[in-house]
Amino acid sequence: MSVGVSVTQDANDQHPLLPAVEEVKKQKGRAPAQMIVAEGYPPRANILAAADGGRDLIGGTLAADAEATPRRLEKRGVDPAFYPQHFRYDPATDTSLCPAGQGLHFSYTQHDRWGVERHLDRARAADCRACALRAPCGAGPQGRTLVRTENVPAVAAYAAKMQTEAGRAAYRRRAPVAEFSNLWRKAKLGLRQFCVRGLRKARCEVLWACLTYNLQQGCRLRWKVRLATAPA
């Protein structure tokens, strides 16, 4: 059954999730304890909002953030042997070790992205000036820097959950429920495009479609129960 519906001009599914939760809360009197959402819904901002609200969010896996793409490093003249993946981080000393054996020490942490901490490690300028591999490494006058990106605990917990079999099994329950209703409205009700203009009119049209779908499904389920309980 459709619980809530809205119309938006957003180009992706990231922003409508929180308004959808409020719509469900308004219709049902409480917010859902668990949300199984489509692949495009769980950016880090939505993961943090779900965690703050105590809701279990199930969705797609998170793509890793690339801090420095090979194209950018190549443009700077950095040899591939000195790309970030070849630096080894030692959590015991909070130091990153470059391929030449020099240590890059923690400098500061940036919180300029939702759900992500970016730790900047910097080598001592004197160590880089004395290094024979300074040119292919691409070290600047102040020494080579490296940015280590980590998810905040709530986002890291979500990413770990969606790597488990239980998380993937929960996500597989979404398609038969959500996609069936969407395809029904397209195939049976012809709701492939709106017949009106403007968000308010379009919302009225989709509300009528959802009401029709709910009535049809209610009738189907009612007869299904009667047939199951009818005497042989």
Image (cartoon, rainbow, N blue to C red):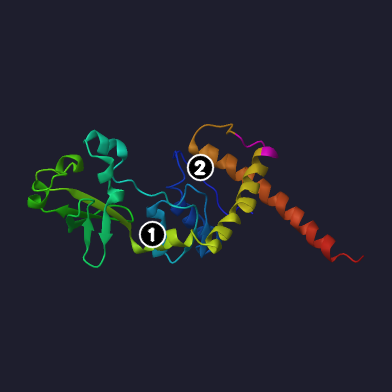
Amino acid on which disc 1 is placed:
Val
Which contiguous range is marked in magenta?
A: 187-192
Residue 143 visible from this viewpoint: yes
Label of residue 155 in the image: 1
- For marks 2 and 1, the one nearer the N-term is 2
Task: Name the quarter where the C terminus is drawn.
Answer: bottom right
Instruction: Report crowding for label 1: few under 14, some 14 to 19, many 20 or more residues within 10 A (C-alpha).
Output: many
The residue beneath circle 2 is: 7
Q: Nearer the viewer, mark 2 or mark 1?
A: 1
Q: Tell me where residue 183 appears, x and y as whole percent.
A: 65, 42
Q: Residue furthest front?
A: 132
Q: CA distance from mark 2 to mark 1?
A: 28 Å
Q: Is residue 170 left or right of residue 55?
A: right
Query: In terms of depth relative to the viewer, which is nearer, 130 or 96?
Result: 130
Q: Is residue 84 left or right of residue 225?
A: left
Query: In terms of depth relative to the viewer, which is nearer, 151 or 6?
Result: 151
For the point 55% across and 58% down, the residue is 168
Query: In terms of depth relative to the viewer, which is nearer, 194 or 87?
Result: 87
Q: Tell me where residue 218 appears, x and y as whole percent.
A: 72, 55
